[in-house]
Amino acid sequence: MVLDELALKIINEVRKLIHEDIIIINTDGIIIASTDPERTGTFHEGSLISLKERKTFTITVEDEKRLSGVKAGINLPIYFQNEIVGVIGITGDPDHISPFGEMLRRMTELLIRENYYTDQIDLHQRTLEAFVFDWIQNVEWDENFHERSHMLNIELNSQRQVIIFEWENQNILPIDTRQLIIDLTNRNKQDVFVRWGNNRIVVLMSIEDSRKDYYQLINDLYKIIRNRLNSPIAAGVGQQIIPDQLHKSYHQAVRALKVALKTSSIIFDLDLTIDIILQELSPEIKKTFIERTIEPILNEEDLFITIKEYINQNQSLKNTAQSLHIHINTLLYRLNKITELTKLNPKDIQDLFKLYIGTYLLDDSTKKHR
């Protein structure tokens, strides 16, 4: 029952407005939450009178002697969807606390409604997440699948592409993500947005003739999510595909996301080349390749940073030295040291390619960003 789940929250919120003792009582007359823990779980006879008469019941000092489990104060019935779901009681001098009664009752009912609708939104999201999970797992499109899509108002006929957004900030609350998804859904009714774990949003973007510039649409979406969550964001974008093959676009998006995470950017699967091959290597192969290439310099931070920057600067000695703020002779010394330790010469294109793959696989398989 909704009140049982909310009782402590209601007590804590209402206590901010009034310092008298407060109790929440269910429809059986049992106190389910109280500012006085000793009263929780006890019977309160006065609440049953309030429930029966469907109105505020004032408890006097004399009533304390004849009614079980009561203290002087007032009891007010709590309504939800035109039904009484419980009673809120305020202990104290009735003349002093009565002016607060109606305000606290309305606040309590508001909290109940808010929690109920939040639960409904969460239930819808969980149902949607389960449907999307089945969709990208390529389950059979049986009658049940079509019924679920109809219930969720999801179009199954148009082409779609999968986009996966991932962020690093673990301090982002689920409620922030939920509200963002609601806002995005209201903004783009034809697209499907679902939360995917604690730090991902999966988008099934609808491909329609009226929507031409998909690169721009995705970039706009990326900026909205990044700005709303105030966190670095990576996005992997799968290819546009027929709806019953959506699992292919999802796996493409996952592959692109692994690359995007390196730079917190948007990566389209269509733009991947060598990354396609490297992403498919097993962890054992990656580990072996690293051992045979860059492992001797992993603990030499200056050398490791140098080779990565040398690659980023397209083998330009001048630009690499400037970027690292070192003299060019120092750079040449470091490159020679790399050759000595790894037996790979950065000035040789084939050896440099091996060093590049080694640094790529290190970041990809161990998440060590140096």
Image (tube, grey):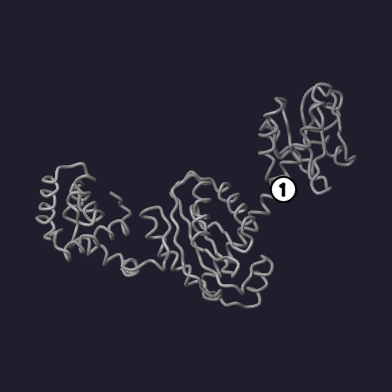
- Left or right: residue 132 versus residue 268 is right
Q: Amino acid at mark 1?
A: Val
The residue lying toward the viewer, choosing from 75 and 320, is 320
Q: Position of residue 14 (x, y in %)?
A: 70, 32
| Rendered view: 303 above or below 152 | above
The residue sitting at the right extreme is 53
In what element is the residue under mark 1? Answer: helix
Q: In the displayed structure, does residue 328 sit left or right of residue 146?
A: left
Q: Is residue 80 left or right of residue 220?
A: right
Number of labels in the image equals 1
Q: Position of residue 250 (x, y in %)?
A: 48, 67
- Pick the front one: 231 or 8: 231
Position of residue 138 measured from the top left corner of the image (x, y, whole percent): 52, 74
Above or below residue 324? Residue 91 is above
Picture quarter containing residue 20?
top right
Query: Relative to 65, is 1 on the left or the right?
Result: left
Of 267 and 152, the residue lying toward us: 267
Q: Nearer the viewer, residue 35 or 363?
A: 363
For the point 37% across and 60% down, which residue is it?
259
Give the class, few, some or many, for how many residues have Cα within 10 Å of label 1's Cα (few <14, many ≥20): some
At which x and y percent is residue 77?
Answer: 82, 39
Residue under numbered circle 1: 2
User: Does residue 58 sit above or below 278 in this rendering?
Assistant: above
